Image (spheres, rainbow, N blue to C red):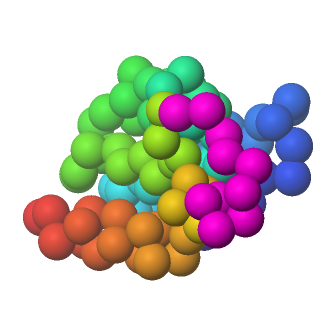
Amino acid sequence: MIDPRSLVPFDWDLVKGSVAKTGRVVTVEESPKRGGLGAEIAATLAEEMIDFLVAPVKRVAAPCTPAPFSPPMEKFYVPDAKRIAQAARDLIAIS
C-alpha cells in the first residue's frame, strides 16, 4: 500500500517500483471516479508500465454524482474498507 503525501511532486518511482513487483494496481480516492486523480494514475501506468501489469487497474472512488451533505448518505458515497478490500480480492483472483 502506498499513501502519497503529496500529489505535486508525485513519487512515480515508488509507484512504478510497486507495479513492477506486484503487477497489480488499485487506486482509491474520495473524489468521483470520472476525471479524478485515480484515472490519471491509471492512464499513466497503463502507458508506461503495461508490460508489468498482469491485471487491469482497478479504481475505487465515489460515484459520478453530486457529493451528499447528509452523514448517512456519505457512507454510500465515500469508498470504504469493504469496497477497497473487494477490489483487491478481485485483482488477486485474476491470474
Q: Where is residue 92 in the image (x, y as percent from the top left)?
A: 25, 71
**Secondary structure character of the magenta stretch overall:** loop
Q: Which of 51 and 41 is in front in this view?
A: 41
Up the image or down, 66 lies above or below 73; here it is above
Taking the magenta stretch, the answer to whether it contains residue 66 is: yes
Q: Nearer the viewer, residue 36 or 43?
A: 36
Asked whether residue 90 appears in the rendered view, the answer is: yes
Name the residue at 27% across, 63% down.
Answer: 91
Name the residue at 16% across, 71% down.
Answer: 93
Up the image or down, 65 lies above or below 56; here it is above
Name the residue at 12% across, 64% down.
Answer: 95
Q: Position of residue 40 (x, y in %)?
A: 56, 26
Quadrant of res 90: bottom left
Left or right of 36 on screen, residue 93 = left
Q: Position of residue 39 (x, y in %)?
A: 50, 30
Instruction: Identify the image quadrant of the N terminus.
Output: bottom right
**How many marks on residues?**
0
Q: Give the range drawn in magenta.
A: 65-74
Left or right of 94 on screen, residue 71 = right
Taking the magenta stretch, the answer to whether it contains residue 45 is: no
Up the image or down, 15 lies above or below 65; here it is below
Name the residue at 36% across, 49% down.
Answer: 58
Asked whether residue 88 appears in the rendered view, the answer is: no
Q: Position of residue 52 (x, y in %)?
A: 32, 45
